[in-house]
Amino acid sequence: MTVNAALRLMAGTVVLISLVLGTYLSHNWFYLTGFVGLNLLQSAFTGWCPAITIFKKLGLKQDSCNITGMSVNQAVHILAGSIILGTVIAVMIFNVNIMLFIITGIVGASLIQSAFTGWCPGMTIARLLGCKEAV
């Protein structure tokens, strides 16, 4: 498993768990969901998040970035992070119906499955937009 796959697995898992906890325990857990979205966004631009450091120390392989332009992984982080953060802001700040989190749950599940299969709809969108695969 690569660092990016592990990051998607962890992000998707935390998103789904925080959605469940936010639904059944306290809406404050939705802030953790938003934090995951924010971290995905910033990691797309900086190439760093706390989990990446841990995964590297665990010996997971880092994708090489010998490409010009945006990689598929960066684009997926931007897409997923934007959707997650956007839904959290809509529900928590603008009082949009909590059912909007169904979209967030789908994104979280997609991140988890992409860690194992190497494919998700966001990757297809990224490729169609011209993003390149990191090797």
Image (cartoon, grey):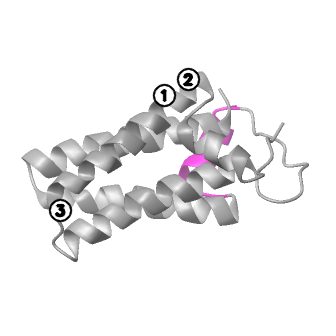
Q: Residue at x 22, y 66 (%)?
A: 91
Q: Along the polypeptide, which appears first: circle 3 or circle 1?
A: 3
Q: Nearer the viewer, residue 98 or 116?
A: 98
Count of numbered marks: 3
Task: Tell me the quarter of the picture where residue 43 sits.
Answer: bottom right
Q: Nearer the viewer, residue 131 or 38?
A: 131
Q: Are marks 3 and 1 in contact (CB under 8 Å)?
A: no
Q: Is 13 on the left-hand or right-hand side of 29?
A: right
Amino acid type of the residue that numbered disc 3 sits on in the rendered structure: Asn
Residue 113 numbered tag: 1
Residue 116 numbered tag: 2
Q: Residue at x 77, y 57 (%)?
A: 70
Examine the rendering and report whether any part of residue 94 can be seen: yes
Residue 55 shown in magenta: yes
Residue 53 % position (x, y): 63, 49
Task: Tell me the quarter of the picture where residue 121 sits.
Answer: top right
Amino acid type of the residue that numbered disc 2 sits on in the rendered structure: Phe
The residue labelled by disc 3 is 28
Which of the two discs, 2 and 3, sits closer to the camera?
2
Residue 4 % position (x, y): 64, 40
- Label 2 sits on a secondary structure element that is helix
Amino acid type of the residue that numbered disc 1 sits on in the rendered structure: Gln
Q: Is 44 on the left-hand or right-hand side of 97?
A: right
Which of the two discs, 3 and 1, sits closer to the camera?
1
Residue 128 % position (x, y): 71, 47
Q: Nearer the viewer, residue 82 or 17?
A: 82
Classified by dominant secondary structure, the portion drawn in magenta counts as helix
Examine the rendering and report whether any part of residue 57 can be seen: no
Q: Assign the N terminus to one quadrant of the image.
A: top right
Highlighted range, magenta: 48-60
- Considering every residue shown, the one lying at the far top of the view is 117
